[in-house]
Image: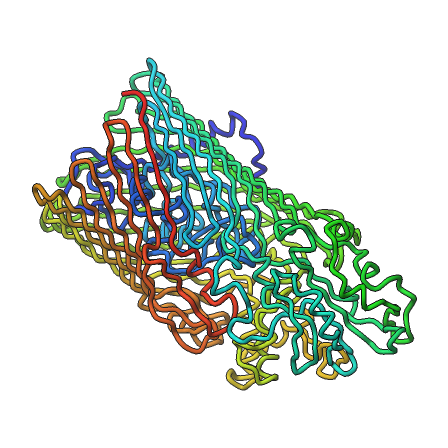
Amino acid sequence: MYRFKTLPAQTALLIAIAAPNLYQTAYAQSTDDNDAHTATSDTKPVLVTGSRIPRASKEGPTSVTVITGEDIEKQGYRNVYDALNAQTQNTGMTQGADFGNTFTPAANTISLRGLGPNHTLILLNGRRIADYPVAYDGSVNFVNLANIPSALVDRIEILNSGASAIYGSDAIAGVVNIITKKQVSGVDINVKAGGTQDGGGSNQRIQITGGGSSGNLTGLFGIELSRTQPIWSRQRDFMSSTSSDGTTPTRVFSRQNVDSGKYIDPGAATCDQLGNLFYDSVVRVKSKSGVYCGSGKAQPAYWTTMTQNESENLFGSLRYQLSAKTELFSDLMLGFNSTQNNTRGPSWTSEAVSNSYFFNQNSGNNESWSRRISPEEIGGATRYNRKWNDVAANLTVGVRGDIPSTSSWNYEAAYNISAYTSRKTTPLLLSNVDSFFLGPRLGYDADGIAIYAPDPKRLYQPLTPDQFNSITGEAISRDKSWTQTLSLSANGELFDLPAGPVRVAAVTELGSQGFSNTPDPQINQGVFYNQAAANGASGSRQRYALGTELNIPIIKELVATVAGRYDEYNFAGRSDGKFTYNTGLEFRPANTLLFRGNYATSFRAPDMNYIYSSTTRGYYSSTTDYYRCQRAGQALAGCEFNNYSPGANYIQTGSKDLKSENGKSWSYGVVWSPSANFDISADFWRIQIDNLVTNLDPDTILHNEANCRAGQLNINSPICADALARVQRNPANAIFNPNAIQNILVNPINAASERTSGLDFSGKWRIKAGGVGDFLLKANYTKVLSHHYKQFAADPDTDELNSLTNPDWGSKVNASVTWLRNKWTSTVQVTRYGSLPSADQTRRISPFALVNLSASYQINPRASVSLIVNNVFNSVRQDNTAGWPYYPVGNYNPYGRQGWLEFNYHFGS
């Protein structure tokens, strides 16, 4: 097993002798229109993501989408994540920073082809970067795209196919390569500020980039500072209350007789004196279970739909020409990010650590008291914000150049290290909260039920901020991840064929990665109220890889590409090795026409979170109990068990026996480019994953359990046997909360398979209209043709494409028109999203389109000003079928119209 902490010179020498390796980073030639699809040859070979061999054409056997740094600004994208999220290949819904209830509200990611964020390989300048240290959805590792500054992005290349034979593990659904600028002359200052029409979300950004050269030394630097204020759900009228659709207001002050199941009426005067809380919304509520003081704004009061964020990103790059054929290089990127969000206010239920009720000595009844604490009582909702302070760092150093005594061979030796640390601060009620509301515990009755003699006035008395502070503390968790790679590379011409030279690239890598999650020790010391035991987790693994790639001109019109790579991972006392290969064909019957095809195998080593996660107990932020809704005969939209918060408890375990996933993909297509001003392409693709590692989704488990109990699924099927075993419930005759969920048991498994297929279309047309100006039309379209998933080998295929439980899009369109005339440039960008299942999972809601607009004016050769408007028509996709928050969270946002003013000034030549 490799223990790769530092790499001695002997190790590097052995690797250098064993296998010379290709220059790893994919730098493509900058052109006036980097995303142009052309079947014709360029004069200078370039490196394009998906191959390690410089090529004479930007188009190859697999399609590559390019987003330039200029596109990010012109098309209204706020940052790198926004640009990637809008791409048509990104058909999967993800839980981003603005999702709300999620394990990773300080991070953003994408899901190419709807296969999840862990099946897309994210590279920075062709090199791996550290995973976010907390697992996505509590299960899979992923790269956070929220902290990559757009100021230094030259372009982003998206390889639309599997590529493990080139890049190794993770490259199953595709590869995203974010390529930074390599040369800047002078200094540019860019200032941007704006906000939303409907309130909240104001943001400011300043970018400073510069560079130059002196003798043999060339360098550039970049600084990006940004700040974003939150948007609270109460700032959007349509979601400012959970009861606007007639749903019964949420209990905020309640006292329940457990034996009868009825709430004890506090009296109209009591609720009236509390009416100013939760933004003047507390009222006396009569329900079928009794009377309590409630509010429709209890949940919206503490819910941010846009996180608060402050970030500082720094970048530096140096190149030193050691000789005419040798260059030393280094890149450094540092990111400091502070994020705050809020998805749940402070709440208390009596004796929650036991059975949530007590014996009231004064009334002689078993009672359950509960309380939601309002923003007015704590000094404002932000007092209960969760906070993340993250630091991300990436460093690369190396040497590259021509191999002596050769005419076409190049080499590179590089070391790359990337690390990510996150400090999370969570406000929590202290363990003294029971005695604060109930007084001292007087003992236990014969059944072990706690005895109190509480004063009801204490329950219905608003708190002061000082009182709240006396029952509230903070838990601080610390998480970190890292990855490092030593790579050696070489490429050149092997020998000549009649149609041209056979070119070859070879690669060898030695690397390691690890993570650690360290919860606050106070959690296990009983300091906080109703907190399950929190166990830390950590682990590491080592890897090495050897690979090669050939580009073979069979005849002038036909070129073949063949690549093979072996990766071995060592972890948890065992090793797992995979050989993957890739074949491609390019047929050019004419200079303007390209037919292409590709077949690739791929793999993904099991997520380290899956392997090293210890038994973890906790609770979900929110849960929908479909079974209890069915038993109560309540429609999902108005069901009291729909999206209740806090959610159900879970018990999660890891597994060190998981196997690697095996994938394969193939694609074929055509590119037609009759001129430099016009091109169009069409590609069919198919991806399949076997031995898919997946952490069971609690919502899917609960949905399956309800369908099994209702007879909608065969109760004797493997999927029903599994679902029923994973949901632990209170007995049906329990005194308190009969049939309520006790625990949901979740763990990773190797599922049978997942496969998906579809079509990609892309086109560009540049029109020169004389005095009117120039027009550039672009369009991209992705249509998913099929998507099937099978959890167990004996189960039938699940049609995910047409499933009413799958929130992914089946189609997506991006189209833009750019007009250039003299000093003016204007772009209209339209994104159309396909239909989605409704929130109550009974039908599909119609497609939805968003329009962005930008206009810029070149004041003089050094200065320009721009106006950017996103969501020009102030459209918000609403869905009222399953209650609050009344829109498809994760698929769309409720921001409405946003606008920015931007000013750029250039100093120097």
Visible in this render: residue 574?
A: yes
Tell me the residue at 64%/67% (across/down). Answer: 282
Percent across and percent down for residue 336 are 53, 36
Give left or right: position of 759 versus 805. left
Tell me the residue at 51%/30% (across/down). Answer: 11
Visible in this render: residue 719?
A: no
**Residue nearest the observer in this picture, 658 or 473:** 473
**Residue nearest the observer in this picture, 148 or 556:** 148
Give left or right: position of 150 versus 425. left
Percent across and percent down for residue 185 are 31, 23
Tell me the residue at 36%/35% (across/down). Answer: 180
Q: Is residue 460 above or below residue 514?
A: below
Q: Quadrant of residue 534?
A: bottom right
Q: Is residue 307 above or below residue 746?
A: above
Q: Quadrant of residue 446?
A: bottom right
In which quadrant of the rendered image does the C terminus lie?
Answer: top left
Tell me the residue at 73%/55% (across/down). Answer: 429
Percent across and percent down for residue 700 are 53, 70
View extreme (left): residue: 770
Percent across and percent down for residue 213 are 33, 18
The total of numbered circles placed on residues is 0
**Residue nearest the observer in this picture, 507 or 753:** 753
Q: Is residue 91 above or below residue 547?
A: below
